[in-house]
């Protein structure tokens, strides 16, 4: 009989322990102020999501206050135009202003 079948079963038996097991390093449970434990996402992503949610609620409130026909489109627009960094927002705003200026003479 070979070592693979010496236990009487179909699967090989693990080798017998010879000495004490090696110590296992455990990660520190202390949370640093810059990175609090969160379920799968960094803190900056949670802050971005909160900012977008607040902006969507303000847009929705303004749309209801103005009694627009499709008030939900204001919140959807905020969600579509949301970008992760503020620099991209300023860049997109600049392009929109430039496109508006270029498009005005063609409109007349």
Image (cartoon, helix red, strand yellow):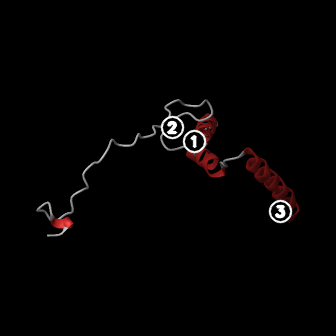
Looking at the image, which residue is at 60% across and 48% down? 79
Nearer-N-terminus badge (1/3): 1
* Front in this rendered view, residue 53 or 68: 53
Q: Position of residue 83 (x, y in %)?
A: 67, 49
Residue corresponding to mark 1: 42
Horizontal placement of 6 versus 72: left or right?
left
The answer to whether residue 42 is seen in the rendering is yes
Q: Quadrant of the C terminus?
A: bottom right
Q: Give the SS element for disc 3.
A: helix
Looking at the image, which residue is at 85% across and 56% down? 98
Image quadrant assignment for residue 8: bottom left
* Front in this rendered view, residue 41 or 64: 41
* Front in this rendered view, residue 29 or 50: 29
Furthest residue in direction bottom, as rendered: 1
Q: Position of residue 6 (x, y in %)?
A: 15, 63
Q: Are marks 2 and 3 in contact (CB under 8 Å)?
A: no
The answer to whether residue 64 is seen in the rendering is no
Mark 1 and mark 3: Cα distance apart in space: 46 Å
Furthest residue in direction left, as rendered: 8
Horizontal placement of 46 versus 27: left or right?
right
Q: Are marks 1 and 2 in contact (CB under 8 Å)?
A: yes
User: Taking 26 as reference, is 93 above or below it?
Assistant: below
Q: Are marks 1 and 3 in contact (CB under 8 Å)?
A: no
Residue corresponding to mark 2: 38
Nearer-N-terminus badge (2/3): 2
Image quadrant assignment for residue 107: bottom right
Horizontal placement of 2 versus 22: left or right?
left
Residue corresponding to mark 3: 107
User: Taking 13 as reference, is 90 above or below it?
Assistant: above
Q: Position of residue 23 (x, y in %)?
A: 41, 39
Horizontal placement of 65 versus 100: left or right?
left
């Amino acid at each position: 009989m070979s070592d693979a079948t010496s236990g009487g079963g179909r699967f090989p038996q693990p080798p017998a322990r010879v000495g004490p097991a090696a110590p296992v390093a455990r990660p520190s449970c202390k949370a640093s102020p810059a990175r609090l434990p969160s379920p799968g996402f960094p803190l900056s992503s949670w802050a971005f999501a909160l900012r977008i949610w607040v902006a969507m609620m303000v847009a929705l409130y303004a749309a209801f206050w103005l009694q627009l026909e499709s008030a939900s489109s204001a919140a959807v627009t905020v969600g579509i135009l949301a970008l992760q960094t503020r620099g991209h927002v300023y860049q997109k705003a600049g392009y929109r202003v430039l496109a508006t200026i270029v498009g005005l003479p063609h409109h007349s």
